[in-house]
Amino acid sequence: MEYRALGRTGLRASRLGFGSMRLPTITIGSTDYIDFDRAVEVLHAAFRMGINYVDCGFLYVSEQAEIAVGRAVNAWHSPDDIIITDKATKFRLERQGDLRRMLEHQLQRLERDWLHFYLFHGIGWDNFWELDTQTGWIRDMFRAQEEGLVRHVGFSFHDEPQAMIDLINLGWAELVTCQYNYLDRRNEAAIRYAASKDVAVVVMGPVGGGRLSVLPKGVAERTGWSAQSAAELALRFVASNPGVDVMLSGMNSVEMVAQNVAAVEKGPLAPAQVQEIAALMDYYGRLAKLYCTGCQYCLPCPQNVNIPRVFELFNYLTVYGLEEYARYEYTRLMAKGQDASQCIECETCLERCPQSIPIPSRLKEAHAALRAGA
């Protein structure tokens, strides 16, 4: 396993990191809970194979992931060798002092006295400051760092790339966790900027949340890769970006850990492969935007149809050829009553669409295609 320096922190982390959001579960009633014995087994397998970076979150797996990670790390023969990152989630902070209360509760769950990294979770530029006005979380974060409860501070990110650069320019971030894969390369310039400022970069979603567990159409023909190698291709593409230090994968079996470790240990793709895949995805992206840019001006729909998501899944099906993912996600949309079959052709959306897409008729087309074989 290759290890990378995490920016200016002095820590070195495995190229493959363990994301704890998909630990093995058991179902009780209609809710999934962590199978703790299996979770510890999978985490220990990851540690044996050289993974030393674990990403946690307060809400992960019915709010139990931190407990499982704590049990696994504390039962490991050298627990201090495992780098733990946790997050202060904005979805549970409402009043002054909530970050401190959350951190103390997370340390109890993990059975630890301190964290290697503590991140502002899922922020953008505006909500970072808005939540601080409401809760004082910036003050509480750096006070916790001064007291030694948190060694290093960073943020995980969901916003436009310029906002990531602006947050880095505040000067305190030592690590950023952001989205990046060959289907979504919007953060490439921001990743380069982070690296230039000696800020560690951790990538979530290198396999696109499951979208890239199969190969998009055209990729196999151009690269010679098989469908069984899809996740390997996705991981090695991300590893080819010199600004990326750690790639997170949510793994729920020993076999998955072994497969992903083997993929990462093969190293980055050749530059020509990276360029070819990027060019193909750029072409597909242009085709998709001819159909719908995802601007969301059509929302809200009076019938609760998630129009941009329907069209996004239709693009995954027809443009990218990601059939299994598109149809599975569409069944989930149907379960929420947000699918295209809810459309009553009221045409409210037509007045708002800047591209003049005939939305009702295209929704019918999308529904028929996404339902076929679902």
Image: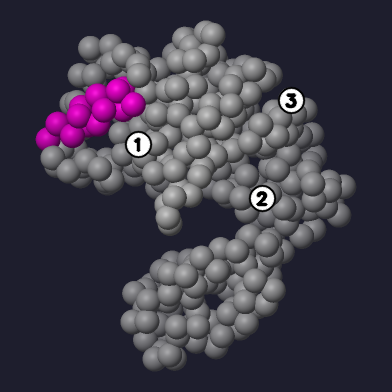
Distance from label 1 to label 2 (Cα)? 26 Å
Q: Which residues are magenta?
A: 96-109
Magenta stretch prevailing secondary structure: helix
Q: Considering only vertical position in the picture, is 186 above or below 261?
A: below
What is the x, y in percent for residue 289? Answer: 57, 67
Q: Is residue 93 visible?
A: yes
The image quadrant where one finds the N terminus is top right
What is the x, y in percent for residue 54? Answer: 50, 26
Q: Determine the secondary structure under disc 2.
A: helix
Distance from label 3 to label 1 (Cα)? 30 Å
Report the side of 287 relative to 86 (left or right): right
Residue found 39% across the figure and 36% down from its top = 64
Report the side of 293 relative to 230 (left or right): left
Q: Which mark is residue 212?
A: 2
Report the side of 341 relative to 321 (left or right): left
Mark 1 crowd level (few <14, some 14–19, many ≥20, 10 Å Cα): many
Report the side of 116 relative to 46 (left or right): left
Nearer mark to the viewer, of 3 and 1: 1
Q: Which mark is residue 265?
A: 3
- Looking at the image, the residue that sits furthest to the left is 96
Q: Which residue is mark 1?
A: 58
Distance from label 3 to label 2 (Cα)? 19 Å
Nearer mark to the viewer, of 1 and 2: 1
What is the x, y in percent for residue 346? Answer: 39, 91
Between discs 3 and 1, the one toward the N terminus: 1
Question: Which image quadrant is residue 317 in?
Answer: bottom right
| Magenta stretch: includes residue 65 | no
